[in-house]
Image: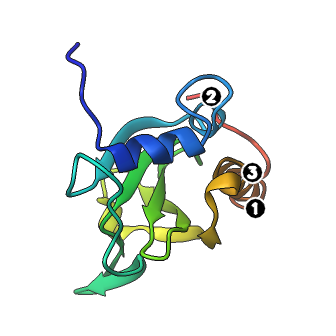
Amino acid sequence: MAHVQLPETVQTIIAQAGGLGLQGAFAYIGASALSHRCAEMVGEYRSSRPSRLKSEGGEPFIDYEVGLECRVNGKPGRRWTLVIAYEPDDTYTVWLIEGRRGRSLSSSIVLACDRDVYCDTLQSVIEAVYDRAIRDHNNGFIPLA
């Protein structure tokens, strides 16, 4: 498998979320299919505008410029996606989105949105958002598949 070089800003987001190892938030939430958005490979690169829920033609989606997203273990038959957006004010917004299988991320609903998240709390916020969603939207049950 080829090694993919990530932009420095995305590497920082991953590190602030506890890394990709067993002690990090991504392992905790069962993350898979990580992807990122960042226009510059070197140095810190921030968004020019805050992330937001946007709708074009009636289909809602999360509009962000810099950050990463991944699939997480969620409700069976639904697709849960975590979006960590790096904001212009040097904070993060953590979005948790639910979509139905066979539909795109653009037809999703927002399960959680925590704004003004500082780097030193990013891992705990990701884990708390996930815990709340499991409790509120999946009867406290974490699916194994």
- Image side of residue 85 versus residue 118, left or right: left
Image coordinates of residue 5 in percent, x first then y, are 25, 31
Which label sits in the foreground, 3 or 1? 3
Provide the residue designation for mark 2: 144
Q: Earlier in the sequence, mark 3 or mark 1?
A: 3
What residue is rendered at 29% in x and 37% in y?
6
Using the numbered discs, state the Cα–Cα distance from disc 1 to disc 2 in whole angstroms.
18 Å
The residue at the far front in this view is 43
Residue nearest the observer in this picture, 134 or 3 = 3
The three-letter code of the residue at mark 1 reads Asp
- Horizontal relation, residue 39 to residue 20: left or right: left
**Labelled pair 3, 1 in contact (Cβ < 8 Å):** no
**What is the x, y in percent for residue 97?**
49, 62
Q: Which mark is residue 29?
A: none
**Mark 3 to mark 1 CA distance (whole Å):** 9 Å
Please name the residue shown 50% across and 68% down the image.
90
Residue beneath disc 1: 136
Contact? badges 3 and 2 (CB < 8 Å): no
Front disc: 3 or 2: 3
Under circle 3, the secondary element is helix
Of the numbered discs 3 and 2, the one sitting upstream in the chain is: 3
Q: Can you identify the residue that label 3 sits on?
A: 131
Q: Quadrant of residue 38?
A: bottom left
- Mark closest to the chain's N terminus, 1 or 2: 1
- The secondary element bearing badge 2 is classed as loop
Secondary element type, mark 1: helix
